Image (tube, rainbow, N blue to C red):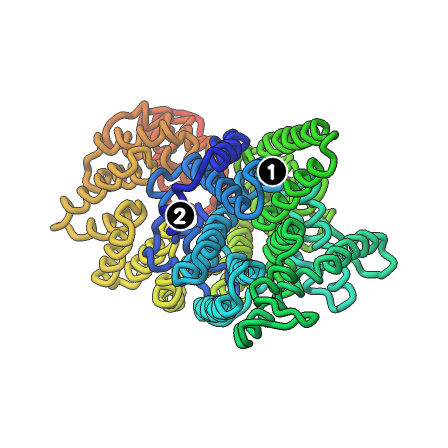
Amino acid sequence: MGLKSLVSRFGKEELSSGLLAVAVFLNTVTFDFVYDDRKAILSNPSVVGELELSTLLSTDFWGVPLDHSGSHKSFRPLTTLSFRLDWLLNASSVQFHITNIILHGIATGLVVRFCKLLLSSQTAWLAGAIFAVHPIHTEAVAGIVGRAEILCSIFYLCCLLYHHHHGWTPCTLVLAGASLLAKEQGITVLPVCAAMDVLSKQDSKSIRRSLLKIGLSAVCLVSLRSLALKGGLPYFSTSDNPAAKSDSMLTRTLTFTYLAVLNLLMIACPANLSYDWSMDAIPLVKSLCDIRNCFTLLTLSVFITTAIKLYPYIQSKLSNIVIKSELSKKPTFRCENNNIIPPQEFIKKYYNNNKQEKDDKKVIVIGLILLVIGYLPASNLLVYVGFVIAERVLYLPSIGYAMLLAFSIQQLISRFPSKKEHIQLFTLLLLITFSMRTVLRNQVWRNEESLYKSGLSINPAKSWSNYANILSTSLGDKSTAELAFKEALLHRSNMADTHYNLGILLQEQQRYKEAITYYEQAIKLRPGLGFAYLNLGLALTQIGDTSKAIDVFRKGVDVTDVGIKDPTDNIEARAASSLNLGRLLLEHGDRNGALTILHEAVNKTAPKIVKTGSGIREKLYNQLGEVYTQLGNIHEAEKWYLSSLNANPNHLPAHLTLAKLVAKNNSRLDEAERILKRAIAINPNSSSANAHYGLFLLDRNRFQEATEKFSEVVANEPSSYDYVFNLGVAARLAGQLDLAENSYRRAVELRPRDAEPHLNLGAMLHLRGKLQEAESQYLEAWRIQPGHANVKINLERLHNIMKKKDMKIRDIVE
């Protein structure tokens, strides 16, 4: 049977269970991108098309290069490819959720198809129904990144079905590889194939041949994956998996065994669920006296008892391979109590009796293998993983649970036929309860606000911090967000991200000194947090401590990515630190220093930037142009301005700086004007672009046009001193004296402690014959800036006129 015929064998049981799976998750269609979806999809350049398709083979699930020290090492190119296809079809969350729901329906149908190999059609359907509506699947289906589990399970089941009907062929290897490329757990399909071979009725020679091929396949897949990962293992912080970082072997052993039991309990009774179980959500089991060890011992005793009961059956299956092989080498007949019995009858009599009992045990063995081995990669027993508990990784093991539960219900009905209706009623209530629980649990994943609120009781530190981010960025409730950040730090004070995000919140409110404290704490906790250096430098600049800001920016330029999970952010942070360091050095007259820093950023950092929407690359080029402009190297400056526009044709600052440069050449004035008009066309509402054009018109003595342009700008930004003052200048030169006077008066209101607006308003009043009022403005300008030459000259001229008119004058107070 090939894959085509496998699909054609889907019957009403597969279809109905698949539709049930779709039905219970249908309410997730309109949900947002939440939590890990943002990093794995929206911020992943391999998904949104900012990188070539081939990068799927060199980056991890989160878009980080596999050879980077901070890589998660989650090599799942098939899942990431499915995300990219969804993005191409429709870059909305609806498209992604629809795909997840459909895939869950397909996986459910395959569960029924697989269970039919071991169970009756009705019992197989029940297993599929349990799998379809199980609440533990909410994270895997409602959370888009859970698609890795779903795709892995689909290829996993296809591999098992194909292998059952055909034995090992290259297609077995391909399907197992596809499962592995969807999620790491996929490699466990090969041991399950081996177990099914051992428990089958094939002749021993075929079984041994198949086991050898399966073993070689496993070695091949593990080797290829190791090559893809460059042989490295992922790095995880203590908060991700506290037990893995414990120095005590006893603590690690007790905690990991307890976590295995807790995962099993969550599958059996999914009452207490959470989107995140990291940090201290589950305290470490540090002592043998911990009461939780009782649950571990109880569960282990059940498994050991079951294993003891199954041992004779498993041993017989394993010995069958050897015994049958020996029989094939002996004469045709064997002797028993002096009777000659054909080998076939011997085998039938001693190895094929109690068929029903053995088939039942096969179901139990396969179910337990699926339950246990599917969880094994996430158990921390093979390698440490980056989480304490992740509900989505239980998607695959739950296949074994669904099979065992359905089988147990069928056994109860067989043994207690008189209670059949009661058992069926219980089963129906169970399915209804699971379905309702799933539908309600789905709502938690509607958006990030509801998701993070749901985790406050289980993981308060992480959830309060995440919730605070939503309050600050999406909901705009800054005061409540500040309280939420501080609440998170009360639960766990060493969260670098929380200190950093609180710093951003305070900086946005211009509470720079408070923000600086939190940025410094974030850097202390995580020295590699590049954006913390950047924002600390910006905050220091705002309070005027530029020398310290320069030192901080230098540290930000040199920050390393070791242990950082997202190096793309650090690359941008280094580039942005270089940009701001270059600006400060330029302002302090160190043009050569600025040139060196910016060139290093362009040559070493800018080429590594993969998020094209960040704008850092074009800003660096534009800043280099400004440095060369100040150095008087016009040719080189124009080259970098054009490079900025090549990197981003819509980059306004490059248009404006290039236009200013070109306008210095009188033979290129028309070209400069075209550049300015192009800038305005890019963003007609840009005050900066319109103001630059106004200044250009003013310099060209086109005063009326300049007045009109500055009037537009001031209408949009009436509180901008520069725009209001320039409107006054343009209006005065255009002869619009009322507008000029009103503009200067407004400039005085905006900067009452600045001498210039008082001087210009005085000159305007002087011109219009409002002599006493003009005198007051001149005197105020002199009071603010004693010794101002223009003020003294204008005031002397004014006083000469006032003396001729016998007007009272007030002398300058030296």
Label 1 environment density (alpha carbons within 10 Å; few <14, some 14–19, many ≥20): many
Residue on which the image places disc 2? 82
Mark 2: give few (<14), some (14-19) or many (20+) Cα within 10 Å: some
**For numbered disc 2, what is the local secondary structure?**
helix
Give the amino acid at mark 1.
Answer: Ile
Q: In this orientation, which residue lies closer to the viewer: 182 or 503?
A: 182
Q: Which residue is drawn at 72% across and 28% down?
A: 422
Query: Alpha-carbon distance for marks 2 and 1?
Result: 27 Å
Of tags 2 and 1, which is closer to the observer? 1
Q: Up-down: is 20 above or below 689? A: above
Q: Nearer the viewer, residue 416 or 345?
A: 345
Task: Give amino acid for label 2.
Answer: Ser
Q: Is residue 722 left or right of residue 499?
A: left
Q: Name the residue under label 1.
A: 130
Residue 560: x percent and y percent?
Answer: 51, 67
Name the residue located 74 percent from the left edge and 30 percent from the top edge: 419
Q: Where is residue 314 in the image (x, y as percent from the top left)?
A: 66, 62
Nearer to the camera, 339 or 274: 339
- Residue at the limit of the structure toward the right, as seen here: 289
- Can you tell which quarter of the image residue 240 is in? bottom right
773 vs 661: above or below: above
Q: Is residue 710 visible?
A: yes
Q: Position of residue 383 (x, y in %)?
A: 61, 65
Q: Is residue 596 above or below residue 811?
A: below
Compared across the picture, whether 442 is left or right of 92 comes to right
Give percent across and percent down for residue 528: 56, 63
Q: Disc 1 on helix, strand or loop?
A: helix
Q: Is residue 565 visible?
A: no
